[in-house]
Structures are given as structure tokens and as C-alpha cells.
Amino acid sequence: MKRLAVLVGMVFLTGLMVGAATAQTVPRMTIDQLKKLLGDPQVKVIDVRTGSDWAASTVKIKGAIRETPHKAASWGKKY
């Protein structure tokens, strides 16, 4: 459950919205809640920003794993 929460937090932090239905049903977390989880080895932060958004950002989360958002069905089972 923590892993899902971190993924949701990453989506929240980057402003990426998968769709209106998903946005209404996915729980959210604050930046402070995410920061508290970053040292936990059980937690995986998945950065799903697009290549250009990620490259243009001056903020990267240390240890985050980059994945392509529209391929979540294929990589989601790894985590």
C-alpha cells in the first residue's frame, strides 16, 4: 500500500493527471508525507513525468525510478 501511495504522491507532485475518473478515485499525499517515506527501503518512488517535462525540471527526487506513464500496465507489476 505504501508503494501505491508513493506513486500517487509522485503523480500529485508532478501535476500529471491520468484522467478525470482516476483523479477522483486515487488518494493523495502531501509533499511532507512523501518526504517522511523517502528513507524507507520498502518505498519505491516512481517518476512518471514525460521525457521533456523531466528534462526541463530542476527538481529530481533522489532515488526515484523513471517509468513511462502510458506503459504502467507493463511495469506496474514489477513494483
Image (cartoon, rainbow, N blue to C red):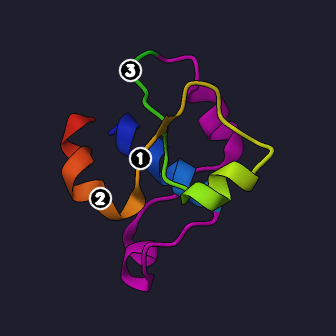
Q: Identify which residue is drawn at 29% across, 56% down.
A: 72
Residue 67 marker: 1
72 part of magenta stretch:
no
Q: Identify which residue is drawn at 39% across, 36% down.
A: 2
Is residue 68 or residue 20 the one in the foreground? 68
Q: Decide if residue 40 is on the left or right side of residue 4.
A: right
Q: Can you say whether 2 is above or below 42 in the image?
A: below
Q: Are marks 3 and 1 in contact (CB under 8 Å)?
A: no
29 part of magenta stretch:
yes
* Quarter of the figure with residue 44: top left
* Residue highlighted by disc 3: 42
Name the element at disc 2: helix
First reached walking from the N terminus: tag 3 or tag 2: 3
Q: CA distance from mark 3 to mark 2?
A: 23 Å
Mark 2 surroundings: few (<14), some (14-19) or many (≥20) residues within 10 A: few
- Dot 1 amino acid type: Glu
Q: Decide if residue 2 is on the left or right side of residue 37.
A: left
Q: Are marks 2 and 1 in contact (CB under 8 Å)?
A: yes
Name the element at disc 3: loop
Quarter holding the C terminus?
Answer: top left
Q: CA distance from mark 3 to mark 1?
A: 18 Å
Is residue 52 or residue 1 the one in the foreground? 52
Mark 1 surroundings: few (<14), some (14-19) or many (≥20) residues within 10 A: some
Q: Identify which residue is drawn at 38% across, 71% down.
A: 25
Provide the residue span drawn in magenta.
Answer: 15-40
The spot of residue 10 in percent (x, y) is: 55, 49
- Dot 2 amino acid type: Lys
Residue 33 marker: none
Q: Identify which residue is drawn at 44% across, 15% down.
A: 41
